[in-house]
Amino acid sequence: MKRLLLLLLCPLLFGIVSAGSVNQIVLDGSVGYRQVDIEMAFSEPSTNGTHYEIMMNDSEFSRTDESILHSIIIVGETTGLMQPEIGEWYDDCHYDPGDGVFVPIYRESDGTAVIPNGTLSVGCTLTGIPSGQEYYFAVLTIYPNNTEVLSSVIASSSTAEDELAEPLKTSPYLFAIGSISLSLIALLFGLRWLDYRDGRTSSKGAHLYIAPALLSLAVLTFYPVIYGIWLALTNADQSQLGEHVFVGIENFVTVFSTSGFLRVTGFTLLWTLVNVVSHIGLGLLLAIALNKHGLRGKTVYRTMLLLPWAIPSYITVLVWRGMFEPAGAINDLLGTDLNLLADANGARFAVIMVNIWLGIPFMMMSISGALQALPKEMYEAAEVDGIGNFSQFRHLTLPNLRSALVPLSLLGFIWTFNMFNVIYLMTDGGPNLDFDGPGSTDILITYVYDVAFRDGAYGVAAAWSVVIFAMLVVFSWTYMKRTNATEAVT
Amino acid sequence: MTRGDVLLRNVTTFILVVLFLLPGCVSPDTSIEENDTEVVSLVVWHSFATESKELAAFESQIDQFMASNPGVEVETSAIPYSEAARQFRIAAQGDEAPDLVRLSSDQLGEIGEVRVGGYPLLQDLRPHLTPLERSKFDDRALNAMRYDGDLLGIPASQDCLSLIYNPVLFDAAGIDYPSEDWTLDDMVYAASQLTQGDVYGLAMPVKNAYWWFGFQAGYGGSLFDENGTPTLDSNGSAEAMNWMIDLELTHGVVQTGTQSESMKTQFLGSKAAMVVDGPWNWATYEAGRIPLQQSILPIVDSTGERVSPLVTYKGWSVSKQSTQKEWSVRLALHLSSSDSQREFALETYTMPTHVDVYIDPEVTENSVISGFLEQLMVGTPAPTTEAMSKVYDPLVTAFENVYSGELDAATALVSADAALESDLEGSG
């Protein structure tokens, strides 16, 4: 229940009551932070041309020049003036036209309060009153003939406290992280006990050694993944953070019914496949070329080919974007007036090309390392047997590189699938030719960014992330099973 | 050990003991002094560019505030303007919001609905200001700082697009300077005459919705109706879109692919005779030592209405999480005061919102400021609504479609309108 503090319900009958002047003031300081309500009754119905000036000061005063003007109410013609409802204007005022029912006051275009002729009383919420400090108020009545009457001065203070926003409660999150960590510790103890029971004494201490790594994984990986899955099942949104509730699979329905779901998934796969194939194909070609026996200036070539990798990728991407602009270097070189980034297919070509450029050096270096590990005797024997270069590549190099290419391609697939910065910096997903859906060059990860941080739909973005996660898990699992990738590495 | 050594040791010990005890004797007084003057710390986020005149003017105002309020320390941080709302939102979610932040009216619309733990991000400033304090600000500016009834900021500046031209290029081509009675046809004709070689008549991002708003209004269209319902496809909107895109694709008076940054570069390099730009870039052009003049945007031939650019307002907002709201409001009022706004206007061509500055002789005698103020008076204030903050995305798509020839302007705008309504329904 609101407290009515310092309510000065002291009806004051003035010694000398002038016609239409204020003869009663009631103040209430409990109405809101930095606000005081004033109700003033006139000795007689107000007349056109009269002004009421509400004066105030932080010390008692008896003359207007000892106080400051807070606000003005004038009596006049109200036809054509706006009459904002209570709560619509910066501060609220209402008046009693004579029937005892208060109605909102009229306002001139500059906000000056206007009451009609015949008004009996007015109530206003005075704003800008410092909180917790006693202030003195009086009403100066100025008649059309410029005679003035100052009401009695009475005091009040705004007593309502400021409403402070409470920070989000972090205890549920800490509790979840703690629970996961404790479960892991319990699991480690359990496994240690099983080892002890089965007489596996050589594992003594092993569980202790892996505990820090597992705990770090729990906090940095397991918890975010579990939280992300939970968020995908809620209506978390920027407009109601901290108040989200469980909504089941609603967000997944939104994801799969997004107009561009198939298109963005399709382009993500195209983007990934073209990039990975190009990275590995061109990287392999360059690695073989640089591995050629007797090639002069290998180090120089290697250094030059490594440059795109050595330069921060965002710089490379921005340089490429500048070159693709209509006034950029590519048009200058070709003598054309192309605006590739404004065209859907042109932009797709541009982003794929730039990412191929960026990805080749890593693959080239990785494959170079694997090539150098291949036994030279094998190639010498092949040459003695008269086997041609292509056959050597097909039957010797490729099968022996498999142990390097399979994990590299898997890694490349996952990296490229989640490659954010090239598209974000080159086109920002555009050109946007579809309303309410992903742009022409959006891939799943860039579109999720838009959903999360531009639309603020955290729950839906989490659902997209779960879908991406599921796609990558299924692909990686299938790929590893089909290629025996882990066996190949070992 | 000699007597001298013993004496030296005793003296040294005495000095050390005295030195050790002395701070203890002095410290109580110091602590009392510290307790007597409680320091209020305010954190302010602004978006003034590094080493800009705006930053210098801002820092001067902060220094003045601290000098007149000795117990207050103000720590300022710069954040990119376009990121201000997002970064503020993220900071508030982590309970790290600054006390005061500079936001534009459309950014208020962007975060007005955001709640953290059920609380809005910004303080309603209505209870903080008296009617007389409010009356010092232009009604339109003050109204633009309101979201859903709450007053979320104190307006400190306003801006809109206008026409800036290079008189030397006009003289060289023998073309009359733009005037108040210029129409869009006059503008296109002049631009075509001025387009010679690698110099273009006009620089303007023809696919940018912000530039389109003014032309849409001039052609008789509007972004929203009186109820706030989107009307992106209202009468005249498609004509305005076609007119803009034709500048590049049909008339060839705007260089292909001109964006807001390349527009600036073109004009600075005297590669464009006219630019539709705001007062925020005037100081940059002036520093580039190119001849400059400003004129009000032309009249649309078919409607007789003047191009009415969108007017946006920037102001100082107080965080709901601030524990120093009263001091924050005082600082906001100081930064929006007539003295501060006068300094900003005269030093940086930042357009004021304080009514006293409108009539300040130094301001009225400055042809640049008064020219831009004249443009502002015929501009259309941007509504501070969630819809306004969401209007750009569908319009980007509409412009892309029309520019690439995928859709005609009318169809693209109908789709954009539908997409915006759907987006608003989704968020509502």
Image (tube, rainbow, N blue to C red):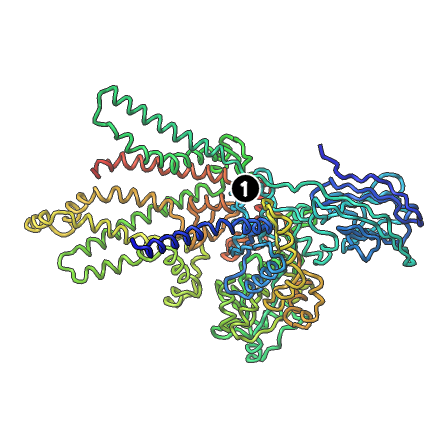
The amino acid at mark 1 is Gln
Q: Nearer the viewer, residue B398 or B224?
A: B224
Q: Is residue A478 left or right of residue A351?
A: left
Q: Nearer the viewer, residue B327 or B292?
A: B327
Q: Badge 1: how crowded within 10 Å, few (<14), some, or many (20+)?
A: many
| On screen, residue A460 above or below B273 | above
Tell me the quarter of the picture where residue B157 sits: bottom right
In the rendered image, the quadrant that contains the C terminus of chain B is: top right
Residue receiving disc 1? A238
Identify the residue at image location x=67%, y=69%.
Answer: B363
Which residue lies at the image location 84% right of the left edge and 53% below the top edge?
A62
Q: Position of residue A370 (x, y in %)?
A: 19, 47
Residue visible at 49% across and 31% down? Answer: A249
**Residue A152 appears in the figure:** yes
* Viewer-nearest residue: B73 or A370: B73
Q: Residue furthest left?
A: A384
Q: Secondary structure at mark 1?
A: helix
Depth check: A275 or B108 in front?
A: B108
